[in-house]
Image (tube, helix red, strand yellow):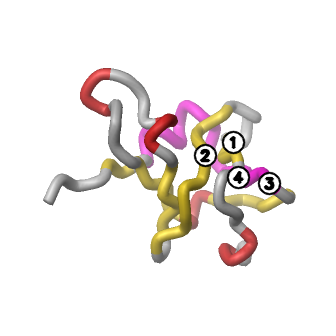
Amino acid sequence: MVDVSQIKEHAEVIGADGVHVGTVDKVDGDRIKLTKKDSGEGSHEGHHHFISVGLVASIEGDTVRLSATGANAVTFEEEESEA
């Protein structure tokens, strides 16, 4: 189990294959909130996405490495719900 308190704001989130997935905005419970600038395009643009901390394989300084590849990690992303 990874110590999520070691996840730093603005750390880079990368997949197991080294592909950039996003940038940490903050840890929100059991999810990592990614910055809006990494939100994608089209209907995904301009709002936060979340990655489960359960996908975190390791934390190395300012890098959060996931257990899933970059392409697979984005399929696990949750979008911020509009309230």
What amino acid does circle 4 point to?
Answer: Ala
The correct choice, above or below, for 36 with respect to 50 in the image is above
Q: CA distance from mark 1 to mark 2?
A: 9 Å
Q: Is residue 9 left or right of residue 42?
A: right
Residue lying at 66% horizontally and 47% vertically, measured from the top left: 13
Residue contact at pointers 4 and 3, CB within 8 angstroms: yes
> x, y percentage for residue 79?
32, 48
In this figure, which residue is indicated by the disc labeled 3? 62
Return the residue at label 2.
23
Q: Residue at x 59, y 53 (%)?
A: 24
How many labels sit on residues? 4
Query: 45 or 53: which is nearer to us?
Result: 45
Label 1 packing within 10 angstroms: few (<14), some (14-19), many (20+)? many
**Quadrant of residue 15 in the image?**
top right
Q: Amino acid type of disc 1?
A: Ile
- Which badge, 4 or 3, is on the more N-terminal residue? 4
Q: Which residue is mark 1?
A: 14
Kindly indicate whether the residue at mark 1 contacts the one at mark 4 (C-beta within 8 angstroms).
Answer: no
The span picked out in magenta is 62-76
User: For the residues marked 2 and 3, what is the alpha-carbon distance in whole angstroms?
Assistant: 10 Å
Crowding at mark 3 (Cα within 10 Å: few <14, some 14-19, many 20+): some
Amino acid type indicated by mark 3: Asp
Circle 2 crowding by C-alpha within 10 Å: few under 14, some 14–19, many from 20: many
Q: Give the labeled residue for mark 4.
A: 11
